Image: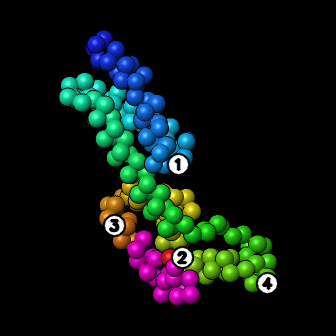
Amino acid sequence: MTAEQVEFYDKLVEKNYPLLYRYAQYWLHDPSAAEVLAFDTLHEAFFQIDTVFSHENPEGWLFQTLKNKIKHHLRTAARNSRRRVSMEEPDAMEATAAAQAGDETHLTLLAIQELLPPEEYEFLLAVCRDRESYETLAERYGATVWACRKRMERIRRRLREEFPERREIF
């Protein structure tokens, strides 16, 4: 990075950070997420300083990058909200007490644990409880992202068949 690029970047940050933050805040309604995405956009600009420096509209490049990051953030949030399932690990005492009290959540979790093979149950916990991405799971299991998605799809289908009354959760 040349001295000219450093000076260019500093001016770009000074001028555009407040605007990027306000734009992200407008769309996200979350100050911490807006701050993270604004800084992430400037971080991206830093690593692609050659592209930004030679771009005919550097501010436009920043805002387009921020728009893409906001869209990705909103897509991820929407996807995660559809996947929210209570997958807390029950311990034996809690499960017995819950079964006696008729607690549906613990009974369902125990039924899921009995229904699925251990490796599928662990996979389900990784996706639902730990919120791990398919990319992370693909690396861990030595599979493709597509294979991990299909595996989760098969697990969900099996759970919907087994628990038709709780179909909307799965």
Tell me the SS state at disc 4: helix
Mark 1 against mark 3, which lies toward the viewer? 1
Residue type, mark 1 in image? His
First-in-chain label (4 vs 3):
4
- Give the quarter of the image for residue 94: bottom right
Q: Is residue 69 left or right of residue 125?
A: left
Report the residue marked by disc 3. 147
Q: Magenta stretch containing residue 156, yes or no?
A: yes
Mark 4–mark 3 distance (CA, rounded to whole Å): 39 Å
- How would you rate the neighbour count of disc 4 (Cα within 10 Å): few for under 14, some for 14-19, many for 20 or more? few
Q: In this view of the protein, which residue sits in the foreground, 95 or 50?
A: 50
The x and y percentages for residue 84 are 55, 66
Q: Which residues are magenta?
A: 152-168
Name the residue furthest top: 3
Report the residue marked by disc 4. 100
Residue type, mark 4 in image? Gln
- How would you rate the neighbour count of disc 1 (Cα within 10 Å): few for under 14, some for 14-19, many for 20 or more? few
